[in-house]
Image (cartoon, rainbow, N blue to C red):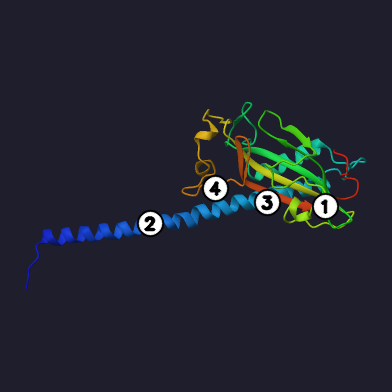
Amino acid sequence: MPIFSITEWLRGSKGAILIEFAFSIPVFLTLIYYLHDIPRAQRHKQQMNFVAQQMSQMLQTVSQGRSNKRITWTDIKNAALAAYLTMYPGVSMKPTQPNYLPLGFYVEAYVYYVVGEANGKASAKWWEGLYYTHLSPLPISGSTDNATRLVRFLRNADPAQIHPSLTIKPGEAKIIVECQLRHHKDKHFSDGRKCSDVSFREMFGFLFYNPPSLIKGDGHQSCYIGTAIFAHRDGLFSSSMP
């Protein structure tokens, strides 16, 4: 019967441990991915939908105590900034100087006014919103389509072409709110780092997952976008832009 020395036994044990360790590392990393990154990605997605829902609710109630209940751009701005606080705690939404952002991404929010047509189609009439890359939010508005948004500005089109979740009756008017976390390669973090030098993985706090862009434009892109659709109360909106 062969007799093994203590040295040989230790050498064999170390080899077995190394093999077990090599097999356990991928399992460990996979667990981290599913226990940390995937729930975090889902939370970001849910938070952005919550931002859009909160903004929608505020737009429906903010003017109820006024004699003139028509929604203004200031109402849109205030509703957006309040709703985004779930994503931007404290003062992390506010740029420290123009184009220098505490979190590396910034607010863009839009309100679309859409009317149902007699033929079962729908037409967008206007959009208005804001982006927050300077010391105060800047207004933006228009009546044309923009490929850097999920909501499409179309006329006499199937409602689902304007937004996949849109259903609308002839003569009915609906509001679509779209909220984005926008990234631009030429913006900077407040500490001076250029946004293009930081991966989305690091920017959003993931360990392995790198979130894909849902929308891309001229130097900018958005990974997380929330939308909400509602039929507004009388007197809040009309076919004329706020």
Query: Is disc 2 placed on a helix, strand or loop?
Result: helix
Crowd rating for badge 3 (residues with CA inside 10 Å; few <14, some 14–19, many 20+):
many
Where disc 3 sits, the SS reads: helix
* Residue 155, x across and y down, in percent: 81, 47
Give the residue pinned by disc 1. 122
Q: Are marks 1 and 2 in contact (CB under 8 Å)?
A: no
Task: Tell me which label, 1 or 4, sits earlier in the chain.
Answer: 1
Q: Amino acid at mark 2?
A: Pro
Image quadrant where residue 223 sits:
top right
Say which of marks 1 and 2 sits in front: 1
Mark linked to residue 163: none
As drawn, which residue projects farthest toward the right?
A: 67
- What is the C-alpha distance between the residues marked 1 and 3? 23 Å
Q: Are marks 4 and 3 in contact (CB under 8 Å)?
A: no
Callout 4 amino acid: Pro
Residue 21 is situated, as x and y percent measured from the top left of the image, at 30, 57
Q: Circle 4 sits in a helix, a strand or a loop, which is it?
A: loop
Residue 228's x, y, as percent?
Answer: 74, 51
Whole-number angstrom distance, CA of label 4 to CA of label 2: 21 Å
Sequence-wise, the earlier of marks 1 and 2 is 2
Q: Earlier in the sequence, mark 1 or mark 3?
A: 3
Q: Which residue is mark 3?
A: 49
Q: Position of residue 43 (x, y in %)?
A: 59, 52
Q: Which residue is mark 4?
A: 211
Q: Tell me which amino acid carries mark 3.
A: Asn
Q: Residues within 10 Å of mark 1 (few under 14, many from 20)?
A: many
At a point 50% along the width and 53% down the height, the residue shown is: 36
Residue under numbered circle 2: 26
Q: Residue at x 60, y 35 (%)?
A: 219
Question: Which of 217 and 205 lies nearest the eye of the viewer?
Answer: 217
Of the image marks 4 and 2, the number of the one nearer the N terminus: 2
